[in-house]
């Protein structure tokens, strides 16, 4: 990919997802050269992950302020860093830093919904209307026709609220500085989405829509009588000992240790890299508000894929996929992307939000994993993100 697509939240997310495909790109990957700098002598800590470390460094050369990664395999766990945590102080990034993981919160939410199904407290075939009467209505939207299952696998047809002009303007232009601390309620998010006609009739195809997960979090609250944050904490975060993971509510800052997050704005002619770390995350509540670390994401996804969080019936539902249509090799289950890259079957998710870009994948046998974070959503060349996962899971060019 040589030309960056239009810089919208959805387009950038789609661009990153496209880099993680298989059928259309696997042949090219096998023959592709290693990322720039891959031939350099790696420090002892990077043995076996030299190309991954080089890909992190190449991403920094391409404009990412700082990158961190964790890779696990037969040789144990490796942690890598490149660049700086703060463009002003020049402090290096730390491999265990907190970061906003964006949409990687989705498998947390789908897991809790599946646990509730196993407890007979709800059913995936329930309609949105049953749990949230009257909320999804207007402009052709009808919660009576949309199931919880369709929310989780992105076949609901609901419009992606992050593509709404107001939301888009506040996240991609200098209007961010006037609106970074705005408070959003889930109901306001849903109203923003349903002010637009649905993209297609429910259940007829796949289209990634964060709106569905905002609704899923509300259903979770109705079914349990507790907040979505409390429920994820008691069912996943606490039992797995994810000490660096939290759902922040309205907390504006990242807990230490953490680096800064940076973005460029479409209406800034100087293309300055702006610090966008602090904000009210309620605008992405239930769909992108997770704060975590590489180690915690590896621990969570490994436990999930090992069947430690769900009974067998719900584990099968989790991994029942629909084609995304973005590439023949990529499918989506309930909160998880699935594809095979250079012979390794992978499950996981990407996360993209203003100032941050993350990837977390675990192999189907859970023997290998890769988690990484870039401290910006603004890349001159989006292939830098895909190069890291290619470097870790694909063989070097002959």
Image (cartoon, rainbow, N blue to C red):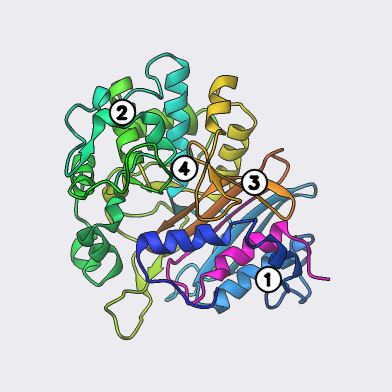
Q: Is residue 46 above or below residue 208?
A: below
In this rendering, the label closer to the viewer, 1 or 2 = 2
Residue 346, numbered circle: 3
SS for dot 2 = helix
Q: Is residue 74 found inside the magenta-colored segment of the image?
A: no
- Compare marks 4 and 1 and give the one earlier in the sequence: 1
The label number, if any, that marks residue 219 in the structure image: 2
The image shows residue 362 at horizontal and vertical percentages of: 64, 44
**Label drawn at residue 349:** none
Q: Nearer the viewer, mark 4 or mark 1?
A: 1
Residue 251, can we see it?
no
Q: Is residue 113 above or below residue 363?
A: above
Disc count in the image? Answer: 4
Query: Looking at the image, is mark 1 or mark 3 nearer the viewer?
Result: 3
Q: Counting residues from the N terminus, which is met first, the one under dot 2 or under dot 4? A: 2
Image coordinates of residue 276 in percent, x first then y, are 33, 65
How far is mark 4 from mark 3, CA to CA?
23 Å
To which residue does mark 1 refer?
54
The residue tagged 4 is 245
Q: CA distance from mark 1 to mark 2?
A: 44 Å
User: Label 2 vs label 4: CA separation?
Assistant: 22 Å
Q: Nearer the viewer, residue 261 or 371?
A: 371
Tell me the SS state at disc 4. Answer: loop
Marked residue nearer the N-terminal end (3 or 2): 2
SS under mark 1: helix
Examine the rendered structure and indicate whether residue 377 appears above or below residue 99.
below
Q: Residue furthest bottom?
A: 270
Between 37 and 141, which is closer to the camera in this rendering?
141
To which quarter of the image does residue 300 belong? Answer: top right
Q: Nearer the viewer, mark 2 or mark 4?
A: 2
C-alpha gap between disc 1 and disc 3? 22 Å
């Amino acid at each position: 990919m040589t030309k960056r697509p239009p810089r919208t939240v959805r387009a950038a997310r789609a661009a990153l997802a496209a880099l993680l495909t298989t059928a259309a790109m696997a042949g090219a990957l096998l023959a592709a050269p290693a990322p720039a700098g891959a031939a350099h002598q790696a420090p002892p800590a990077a043995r076996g992950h030299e190309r991954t470390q080089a890909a992190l460094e190449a991403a920094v050369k391409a404009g990412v302020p700082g990158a961190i990664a964790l890779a696990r395999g037969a040789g144990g766990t490796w942690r890598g860093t490149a660049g700086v945590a703060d463009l002003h102080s020049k402090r290096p990034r730390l491999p265990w830093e907190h970061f906003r993981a964006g949409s990687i919160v989705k498998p947390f939410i789908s897991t809790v919904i599946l646990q509730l199904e196993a407890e007979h407290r709800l059913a995936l075939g329930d309609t949105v209307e049953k749990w949230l009467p009257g909320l999804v209505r207007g402009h052709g939207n009808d919660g009576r026709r949309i199931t919880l299952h369709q929310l989780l696998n992105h076949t609901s047809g609901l419009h992606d609220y992050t593509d709404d002009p107001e939301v888009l303007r506040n996240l991609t232009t200098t209007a961010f500085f006037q609106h970074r601390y705005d408070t959003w309620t889930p109901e306001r998010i849903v109203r923003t989405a349903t002010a637009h006609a649905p993209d297609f009739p429910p259940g007829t195809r796949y289209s990634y829509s964060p709106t569905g997960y905002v609704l899923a979090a509300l259903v979770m609250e109705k079914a349990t009588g507790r907040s979505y944050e409390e429920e994820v904490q008691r069912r996943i975060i606490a039992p797995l000992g994810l000490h660096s993971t939290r759902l922040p509510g309205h907390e504006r800052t990242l807990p230490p240790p953490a680096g800064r997050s940076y973005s460029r704005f479409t209406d800034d002619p100087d293309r300055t890299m702006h610090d966008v770390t602090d904000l009210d995350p309620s605008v992405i509540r239930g769909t992108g508000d997770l704060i975590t670390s590489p180690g915690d994401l590896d621990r969570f996804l490994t436990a999930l894929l090992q069947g430690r969080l769900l009974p067998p019936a719900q584990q099968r539902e989790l991994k029942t996929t629909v084609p995304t249509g973005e590439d023949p090799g990529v499918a989506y289950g309930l909160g998880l992307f699935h594809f095979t890259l250079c012979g390794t079957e992978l499950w996981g998710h990407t996360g993209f939000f203003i100032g941050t870009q993350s990837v977390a994948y675990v192999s189907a046998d859970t023997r290998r994993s890769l988690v990484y974070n870039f401290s910006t959503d603004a890349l001159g060349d989006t292939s830098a993100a895909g190069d890291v996962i290619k470097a870790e899971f694909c063989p070097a060019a002959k």
